[in-house]
Amino acid sequence: MDVRRREFQVSECTEDRVTVRKEWRHLTEPQQQEFLDALQCLMDKPAQSGLTATTSRFSDLQALHRGMTNTAYADIIHHVGQFLPWHRYYMHIYETLLRDECGFTGSIPWWNEQLDADSGNMWQSPMWGADAFGGNGTGSDLCVTDGRFANMTLHIGPEDEDTDYCLRRAWDGESAIANANSTALAMCNSYDTYSPWWDCVSNIPHKGVHTYIGGVMSDIKSSPGDPIFFMHHMYVDRIWWLWQNEDPVNRLYDISGPTVNQTANVEPAGGWQNATLHYELSSFEIMPNVTIGDIMDTKGGYLCYEYE
């Protein structure tokens, strides 16, 4: 076993424990509805985090994401080396709440954005249907008025505000396609070391799809208010998982990049620091902190999953 893996492994991940995250279209209709029911359960459960403006367990997740962009040194989860590790940890928290607090036992779904971008129709997936996540926003406020979360009211955001507003979307399919298609992904995957690779993924397929779904998803701080956020970030995590497994000897524990968003131009005491395997990832005590090293391998012990 790789010495780095041994150091950060928390418990055994055996083949019988591995869960498989599946693309939305590969779930049966009952499985899709079971997942949506569990997600609704999080929205119906009372908040527990104590974070500002939270009204439900689901909003605890939204507040957590916003809180990580409002630290003493501004944003520490975007444009930083721990961007992908922190969001992998965040997806694990999301999955844990669904399973432990809402009894979900199925596969956690993701959205194959490259498939839809390459088809020329970014919004062709049935996940956008009236029996699933709903479609584009309508009317002057661009509110989502169909789907399981139709007319949903959010209380966290936009950005640093705490206001009541609707779940909004403002699709720009052409621009989303340009950021999510095979050409865009191949450009990122041409890099064989983490630093340029994560920067490319962060700024093109990740940011591009956020921006061009629009509405709540385009709000860098409060975007998890749209349940589609988690479908998108499961996909981004899968991109990373695939890249790691193309060359696991060199990539599985490859990490680098600043730990503070340098675009904020606020240099922390002691100067800029680089992300390492020992860097601690926090969730404001929603779950115990972990290190980057703990979550680099999706089957390393602390985590135990793969993608189809």
Image (cartoon, grey):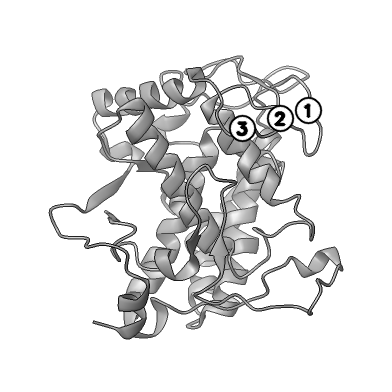
Q: Secondary structure at mark 1?
A: loop
What's the residue type where badge 1 is placed? Asp
Q: Is residue 74 above or below residue 190?
A: above
Residue at x 12%, y 53% (from the top left corner): 16
Left or right: where 87 falls relative to 170: left
Residue, disc 3: 225
Residue matched to label 2: 156
**Residue in the picture at 62% in, 42% down:** 64
Q: Is residue 303 left or right of residue 45?
A: left
- Image quadrant of residue 62? top right
- Give SS at disc 3: helix
Q: Residues within 10 Å of mark 2 (few under 14, many from 20)?
A: many
Q: Which mark is residue 192?
A: none
First along the sequence among labels 1 and 3: 1
Residue at screen point 40% across, 58% down: 238
Labels 3 and 2 touching (C-beta < 8 A):
yes
